[in-house]
């Protein structure tokens, strides 16, 4: 069982609760991957919008997720770190998204780094599996291969590197440390509050499971813990 890899509220996208493969492909170990986009208290993903939102690219620091701490979702040992990929402009405009989408095959041919961007892979302590966190901010990774990490420990900051149209955290569990050859493994998250998608939806507490597509989630302390 994993913990959500952040504090605050985040929007779930490309959830395996909606479909499998969740991202439409089994490539790079992403069969059961999920994306999380930071939101404000009103569940907006960005602090502002202007003409660029409709017709151009936008600076990544306009988005709530940008620079937010990314936490280890479980205890384990770091077995892979990749840094140095640039954080690029964000895209909400269909005019900006179309040429970016056309470049997807080229990014896949370049390999894992071009798709995942800056990322960390952790060998889980209590399961024969590996969790990868991707699209991290360049220069923010604060762990090294061979280092033991605890669940909830800060490991990096959210960025917009790799195959990412706006700052977000991509998380997947695999049966091996190398995403180019690994297969995706199902996962579940422990204890979180979920606001289901739809107007006027009230929140509910879930002891375990996968966030629903389009739901906003917030990590909660373990049952019985204070906080």
Image (cartoon, rainbow, N blue to C red):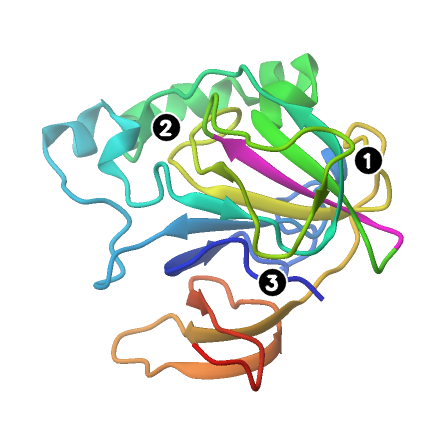
For residue 209, side relative to residue 211 (left or right): right
Dot 1 or dot 3: first in sequence order is: 3
The vertical placement of 137 against 12, above or below, is: above
Q: Are marks 3 and 2 in contact (CB under 8 Å)?
A: no
For residue 176, side relative to residue 100 (left or right): right
Residue at image x 73%, y 33%?
A: 28
For residue 46, side relative to residue 210 (left or right): left
Residue at image x 50%, y 43%?
A: 169
Residue at image x 39%, y 37%?
A: 167
**Depth check, front residue: 149 or 34:** 149
- Give the magenta range: 128-136
Q: Do the residues labelled 1 and 3 touch (CB within 8 Å)?
A: no
For the residues labelled 2 and 1, the Cα–Cα distance comes to: 31 Å
Q: Which mark is residue 113?
A: none
For mark 1, does the 10 Å Cα neighbourhood hold few (<14), some (14 to 19), or many (20 or more) residues? many
Residue 100 x %, y %: 43, 21
Per the image, the residue denoted by label 2 is 97
Q: Mostly what secondary structure, the magenta segment?
A: strand
Which quadrant is the C terminus positioned in? bottom left
Q: Is mark 2 on a helix, strand or loop?
A: helix
For mark 2, does the 10 Å Cα neighbourhood hold few (<14), some (14 to 19), or many (20 or more) residues? some
Question: Does 134 lie within the magenta span?
Answer: yes
Q: Residue 3 carries which label?
A: 3
Of badges 3 and 2, nearer the viewer stands 3
């Amino acid at each position: 069982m994993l913990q959500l890899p952040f504090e605050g509220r985040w929007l779930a996208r490309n959830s395996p609760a909606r479909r499998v493969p969740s991202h439409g492909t089994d490539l790079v170990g992403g069969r059961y991957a999920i994306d999380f986009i930071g939101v404000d208290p009103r569940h907006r993903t960005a602090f502002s919008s202007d003409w660029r939102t409709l017709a151009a690219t936008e600076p990544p620091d306009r988005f709530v997720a940008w620079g937010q701490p990314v936490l280890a979702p479980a205890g384990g040992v770091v077995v892979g770190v990749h840094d140095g990929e640039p954080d690029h402009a964000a895209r909400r405009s269909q005019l900006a998204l179309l040429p970016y989408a056309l470049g997807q095959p080229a990014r896949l041919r370049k390999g894992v780094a071009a798709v995942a961007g800056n990322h960390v892979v952790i060998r889980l302590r209590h399961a024969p599996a590996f969790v990868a966190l991707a699209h991290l901010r360049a220069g923010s990774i604060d762990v090294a291969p061979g280092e033991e990490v605890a669940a909830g420990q800060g490991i990096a900051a959210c960025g917009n590197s790799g195959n990412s149209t706006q700052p977000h955290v991509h998380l997947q569990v695999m049966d091996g440390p190398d995403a180019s050859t690994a297969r995706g493994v199902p996962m579940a998250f422990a204890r979180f509050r979920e606001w289901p998608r739809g107007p006027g939806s009230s929140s509910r507490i879930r002891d375990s499971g996968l966030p629903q597509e389009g739901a906003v989630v917030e990590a909660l302390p373990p049952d019985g813990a204070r906080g």
